[in-house]
Amino acid sequence: MATPIISIVTPTYLRPNEVIGLLENLSRQSLLPDEIILVDGAPADEVATEQSVNERRDDFPFSVRYIRFAGGTAIQRNRGIEEARGKFIAFIDDDVRLEPNFLKNILEQMERENAGEVGGIVGYRSNEFFDVNESERWRWYKRLRLLKTYEPGRYDFESGYPINNSMQPPFSGTRPVDFMTTACAVWRREVLDSGLRFDPFFRDYGVLEDAHFSLRAGRNWELLQCGDAICEELRAPGGRTTRRKIGYKSVANYYYVFKEVSGPLTLRHQYRFWRFQLFELFRISMSAIRRLRWDDVQELAGRFEAIFSVAFRKWRSEVSPEQNTGSASSR
């Protein structure tokens, strides 16, 4: 049996419609994937996604494997990596829709690069672009010199902040990046065979696990963004979480990544990180006052909770062992 070329790993949670939409979208790729591995973190009594996949399984020109495994997107992707058999492993989110030549364009770039030095290539989310010059928040970042770099896709190793890739205007060809989103990225199998996995610290709702993963990969491999591998991210509402939790993880997770990739942190590192976080507290507070939005208050509460946890070293609680909550089925 021939080795599969492309395996796609997709974590999902309570999104049956999005999953079917993704499978339909992938079936229109000019270069078809060989297998799709869906890792569902839904509770055992939620069967809508599994039923939808089983009803449509024979409609698709590739193998569809369905696995029940909880723990959050990072843990689910790790489970999918263990099952994947392809030379290239793609992480594609269930609410992402690829243009027909997405996989073909990325693999052409992979073959074009020298001696397999490129470990991963991320696509371009065309509907996520925003002009940094039109963003009040980013204008203030620049005025106050809160960051050392403002190049999309780069990581500020002095301040602990990843520069949003969505600020990159449309382009053709490839460009180097420090980190890649897991929404639409393709990885060379050798990177994962080296033992690289998502850190179980990022259990539950994922924030910055993709940056942490790719920053560690970037120590040994080149990472690129391909402007010709175009997709859209629908931002499906299902499976989202509260603003309070996002606020918490926007401090605790960012600090964890900073400590892991730039540590041991110096006083200068600490100063730059916390100066940025204090500005974020001020910015969100002003938004809460001006707009009278309860969501802003909830995010502030989460951020204050995280600051307290980091200060008293409670921010990295012991990670419980990963638990498989079901079984796998494959075509």
Image (cartoon, helix red, strand yellow):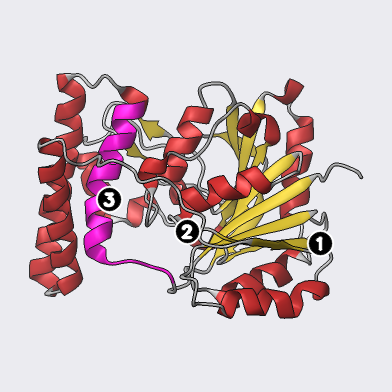
Mark 2 and mark 1: span between their CA atoms?
A: 24 Å
The secondary structure that most of the magenta stretch takes on is: helix
Residue 224 visible at all? yes
Residue occupied by mark 3: 249
Classify mark 3: residues with Cα within 10 Å, few (<14), some (14-19) or many (20+): many
- The location of residue 260, given as percent across then percent down, is 34, 28
The disc label shown at residue 10, or none: none
Magenta stretch? Answer: 239-260
Classify mark 2: residues with Cα within 10 Å, few (<14), some (14-19) or many (20+): many
Q: Is residue 28 above or below residue 172?
A: below
Q: Is 252 a magenta residue?
A: yes
The disc label shown at residue 62, or none: 1
Q: Is 10 a magenta residue?
A: no
Circles 3 and 1, Cβ within 8 Å, touching? The answer is: no
Identify residue type, mark 2. Ala
- The location of residue 121, given as percent across then percent down, is 63, 40
Residue occupied by mark 2: 70
Q: Write down the quadrant of residue 68 in the picture.
A: bottom right
Identify residue type, mark 3. Lys
Q: Nearer the viewer, residue 307 or 331?
A: 331
Mark 2 element type? loop
- The location of residue 316, given as percent across then percent down, is 25, 39
Q: Give the mark nearest the N terminus, 2 or 3.
A: 2
Mark 1 element type? loop
Q: Residue lying furthest right in this view?
A: 1
Residue at the location (47% across, 57% down)?
A: 129
Residue at the location (24% across, 44% down)?
A: 252
Residue at the location (63% across, 53% down)?
A: 9
The residue mark sitting in front, 2 or 1, is: 2
